[in-house]
Image (cartoon, rainbow, N blue to C red):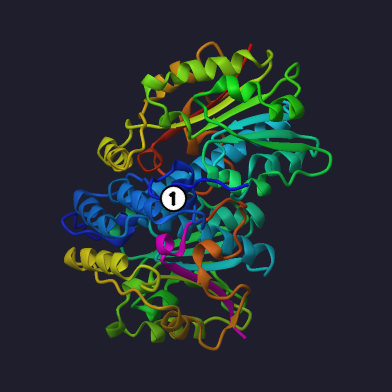
Amino acid sequence: MRPAIDTSKPHAARMYDYYLGGKDHFAADRETAQQAMKSWGAVRTAVRENRAFLGRAVQYLVRDAGIRQFLDIGTGLPSANNVHEVAQAIAPESRVVYVDNDPVVLAHARSLLNSAPPGRTAYIDADLRQPATILASPEVKGTLDLTQPVALMLVAILHFVTDEYNPAALVAALLDALPPGSYLVASHVTPEHDPAGVAGLERAYRQGGVPAQARTADDFAELAFRGLEMIDPGLVLVSEWRPEETGPRPLASEVNWYGAVARKR
Amino acid sequence: MWLSLDTTKPHPARIYDYLLGGKDNFAVDRETAESAMRSWRSVRTAARENRAFLGRAVRYLVREAGIRQFLDVGTGLPAANNVHEVAQALEPECRVVYADNDPIVLAHARALLASGPEGRTAYIDADLREPEKILASRAVAETLDLSEPVALMLVAVLHFLPDEDDPAHSVSTLLDALPAGSYLVASHATLEYDEEAVSGAGRAYQGRGLAGQLRTIDELAELAFRGLDMVDPGVVPVSEWRPEGNRPRPLPAEVNANGGVGRKP
């Protein structure tokens, strides 16, 4: 059964698609996104930097850390460089389970499921706030071997989980199910470099019915990476995490977004 | 030598430096940039994309077109990937003459003159409106061999010459002095992708005494590339000119600048 798509309310996945120049969004998504852009003018730059961080983190995990399994929660709409495409380009046997709570993502999941043969992908229509549902799903059981290391991807999603939902407990519940040698990749919007601009985006989202909470580097580290071994260069702006290009990179006040990769001991 | 710097008027080179995150700019430059950004919010993205276009064009010219000589008019302040650095990283014997009309660029020209020993660089304090002076300079005579192909670089400079300054005369005078097989690299801001944003930025510049003229893709082609053989993909948004890697690219409405590379037959 298909969950109903409510086009009258914006959704984070569709706004992200709009920022990236995609086509899978509705008027409500565009209106909220445009409102946010009035305050944080470079949000499109930031979203691209986040997407590029995701790609570099997956490349690092496959190439340097030997990871072949991914659990990607808050996938968003299919775009350039989906996790399985990046991973399977290096190691075709890589397996990915995608999770999102937007029915529009579900409707487009086919392009996330076009795995090349030795690898495998699956999709779950679920929410980060239900870690037990995700872990007990037939898709996770049928796709991932939880006795072997898995990379948990929480990219640009934790800032949509406000404190009342206890995001630290959600992260811990997921990581507890993964063996030592597993990894966490996470990124998170911060108010530190442009407080007014980012606060304006939070307001625009909240007015659209999308709760959002930017967090400082310390709060983000505490919530997601406590007890994990940080991979160099630690928790930094997503644009500064192992950058590949030599040209000028965007300023902190444009990016407003931290990311890190860490290993479970 | 003392330079007379007028710090009460903005200068495009210093605004560009500010947009790229540099430090060689004054309050009036920052104010002009901030004012432009209120309308064209992604102008920093545009500056970075223009700079990246410059780098890709130089690599194309050195690697695929065999060019070893460059005349770069409207250089701007030294930043990452100056022309001679990009060119000499591929072919150390490359020679570059830089020209700018901002005394502060002259003051920082030492960084542009740090040529590798096999190549050579020179700097002229000159204006694109005086092409004859550039061509007659000692710097050109001693650095470039005008019987061999030269790449003329007019990157993000022609839009500072309104029609009454006769930019077509400047382009043709410079190109006429170069032999067949020479190249022109040019980029130019345009209104055609986001008229409201870019015209607002144009007003911010003009209101502070910076003349200029925005031109469409067709007007740029006519002004700069008439009679030249265009290198693929022709005149396009600078971010779409032979992009490298597969990371998501900004939209034309963020970049608002076209560019191309043409060969003199």
Residue B257, how many percent across, how many down?
42, 35
Task: Give the magenta-colored segment's residue range.
Answer: A250-265
Q: Is residue B230 visible?
A: no
Q: Is residue B193 left or right of residue B138?
A: left
Q: Does A50 sit left or right of B124 as displayed?
A: left
Q: Position of residue B107 (x, y in %)?
A: 60, 48
> What percent of the width, then of the height, locates residue B216?
37, 25
Residue B112 x %, y %:
66, 44
**Residue B194 at least partly seen:** yes
In the displayed orientation, state which residue is furthest to the front: B2
Q: Is residue A235 above or below residue A95?
A: below
Residue that mark 1 sits on: A79
Callout 1: SS: loop
Res. A68 image quadrant: bottom right
- Residue A138 figure quarter: bottom left
Q: Amino acid at mark 1?
A: Ser
Q: Chain of mark 1?
A: A
Residue located at (37% from left, 45% from top):
A21
Reply above or below: B25 against B196: below
Q: Nearer the viewer, residue B147 or B1?
A: B1
Question: Does residue B97 show up magenta in the picture?
Answer: no
Classify the position of the C terminus of chain B by image quarter. Answer: top right
- Looking at the image, which is closer to me, A91 or A38? A38
Numbered circles on residues, count: 1
Which residue occupies the foreground of this view, B110 or B119? B110
**Is disc 1 surrounded by few (<14), some (14 to 19) or many (20+) residues within 10 Å?**
some
Residue at the spot x=72%, y=38% of the render?
A: B121
User: Can you say whether A246 is above or below B57 in the image?
Assistant: below
Identify the residue at horizontal 44%, vertical 77% (top origin): A135
